[in-house]
Image (cartoon, rainbow, N blue to C red):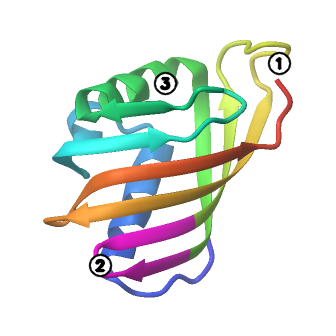
Amino acid sequence: MAELPVHPNIELAVRYHEAVAAGATGDDLARFFHPDAVHRELPNALLPNGATRSLPEILDAAERGQRVIREQRFDIHNAVATGDEVALEVTWTGVLAIPLGALAAGAELRAEIATFLTIRDGLIRAQRNYDCYLTKF
């Protein structure tokens, strides 16, 4: 991981990504989010129509993701914070637990991601992801 600026909201964003990479679900994941959190994933190769999720849907997606991805990591290259907003430039790598499209279990997926977080009361209130998958499905 790159040397990132010290800012409490960037530190929260990094801890959140580390928890996701470690497989956090349920309360271990919910502790990062404001109860009214909304996650918007813009259209991408896996979700051509994108997705918008409330906190219960975020937690459900994390549980489902555990069945699809057996390991993952986030390499954060850059982070900028101003006020309650954080922008991250991230390379995501995941290893499939099951086949996906033409890919076999064990195949590595990669994406370049821009993530924008809005922080309220020390918790993630909103997340927007722009995921550019480098892997062909």
Is the residue 39 above or below the residue 51 in the image?
Answer: below
Can residue 62 be seen at all in this image of the molecule? yes
Q: Which residues are magenta?
A: 79-88
By secondary structure, the bulk of the magenta-drawn segment is best described as strand
User: Is 17 placed above or below 97 here?
Assistant: below
N-terminal-most mark, 1 or 2: 2
* Mark 2 nearby-residue class (10 Å; few <14, some 14–19, many ≥20): few
- Gap between marks 1 and 2 measured at Cα: 39 Å
User: CB of mark 3 within 8 Å of CB of mark 1?
Assistant: no
Determine which of the numbered discs, if any, sits on residue 8 in the image: 2
Image coordinates of residue 34 in percent, x first then y, are 18, 50
Outermost residue to the front? 49
Amino acid at circle 3: Gln
Residue that label 1 marks: 103
> In this image, 13 relative to 71: left or right?
left
Contact between marks 1 and 2 (CB within 8 A): the answer is no
Q: Which three-letter amino acid code belongs to the residue tagged 2?
A: Pro
